[in-house]
């Protein structure tokens, strides 16, 4: 497959390909949309570039940029198809965007879900605050050491998981897939202590 052929397949996925650097690199953009499952894409930009005998797929526009290596351009296009056209993993109505995160494993998500910890909203706020403080401390240390990497510190980051229906719970998945918190919201007749 050539970059021009890849560009056509990408066009067929309703994405926007741009041949760059004299035809040696392909940039892929999405206009920004909400997919069929409620996940919002904020106009993502990906680069496809050859490096030696490898193809790299690099996400450029995310708070958590990603880089994937492949032997063939067909594999790169297949991953883009999975990311943009794939289906989320549905567990009890919770939609885990497994299709959007190639490094996530279904077995790890299912295990984390099976062992989810149910907490009240007040407790969840305490957990979040502790994670923010720990992240800041660890991030500053990594910057001092010069060891920071975009995939670093996933144990302090969470992803909010949408549900297909109405629920009085929110679900938060830790990005290292080691913990899930089911957060119960307060009902109108419940009073939160000061």
Image (spheres, rainbow, N blue to C red):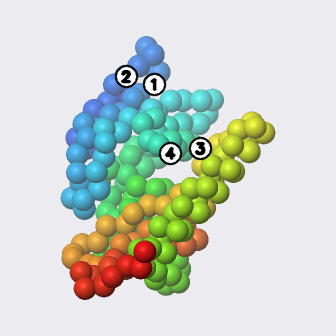
Mark 3 is surrounded, within 10 Å at the Cα level, by few (under 14), some (14 to 19) or many (20 or more) other residues, namely few
| Number of the front mark, 1 or 3 | 3
Question: Marks 4 and 1: in contact by CB < 8 Å?
Answer: no
Question: Marks 2 and 4: in contact by CB < 8 Å?
Answer: no
| Number of the front mark, 2 or 3 | 3
The outermost residue toward the top is: 22
Q: Which residue is mark 2?
A: 19
Q: Which residue is mark 4?
A: 64
Coordinates of residue 163 in the picture (x, y in percent) = 29, 72
Q: For residue 62, what is the image quadrant? A: top left
Q: Is residue 78 visible?
A: no
Coordinates of residue 54 in the picture (x, y in percent) = 59, 36
Q: Is residue 21 left or right of residue 89?
A: right
**In the displayed structure, would residue 178 be above or below residue 92?**
above
Coordinates of residue 129 in the picture (x, y in percent) = 54, 61
The CA distance from mark 1 to mark 3 is: 23 Å
Q: Which residue is mark 1?
A: 25
Question: Marks 2 and 1: in contact by CB < 8 Å?
Answer: yes
Secondary structure, mark 2, is strand
Is tag 2's residue or tag 3's residue first in the polypeptide sequence?
Answer: 2
Question: Marks 3 and 4: in contact by CB < 8 Å?
Answer: yes
Secondary structure, mark 3, is loop
Q: Is residue 39 visible?
A: yes
Q: Which residue is mark 3?
A: 150
Question: Marks 3 and 1: in contact by CB < 8 Å?
Answer: no
Is tag 1's residue or tag 4's residue first in the polypeptide sequence?
Answer: 1
The residue located at (37%, 22%) in the rendering is: 19
The outermost residue toward the right is: 145
| Number of the front mark, 4 or 2 | 4
Secondary structure, mark 1, is strand
Q: What number is the disc on residue 102? A: none
């Amino acid at each position: 497959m050539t970059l021009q052929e890849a560009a056509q397949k990408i066009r067929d996925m309703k994405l926007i390909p741009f041949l760059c650097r004299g035809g040696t690199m392909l940039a892929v953009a999405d206009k920004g949309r909400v997919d069929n499952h409620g996940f919002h894409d904020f106009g993502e930009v990906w680069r496809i570039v050859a490096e030696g005998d490898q193809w790299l797929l690099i996400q450029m526009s995310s708070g958590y940029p990603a880089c994937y290596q492949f032997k063939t351009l067909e594999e790169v296009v297949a991953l883009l198809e999975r990311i943009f056209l794939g289906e989320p993993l549905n567990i009890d109505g919770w939609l885990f965007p497994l299709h959007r995160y190639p490094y996530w494993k279904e077995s790890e998500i299912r295990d984390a879900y099976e062992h989810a910890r149910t907490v009240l909203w007040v407790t969840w706020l305490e957990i979040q605050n502790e994670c923010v403080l720990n992240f800041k401390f660890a991030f500053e240390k990594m910057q001092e050491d010069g060891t920071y990497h975009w995939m670093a510190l996933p144990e302090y980051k969470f992803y909010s998981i949408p549900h297909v229906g109405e629920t009085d719970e929110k679900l938060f998945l830790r990005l290292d897939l080691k913990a899930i918190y089911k957060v119960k919201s307060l009902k109108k007749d419940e009073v939160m202590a000061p």
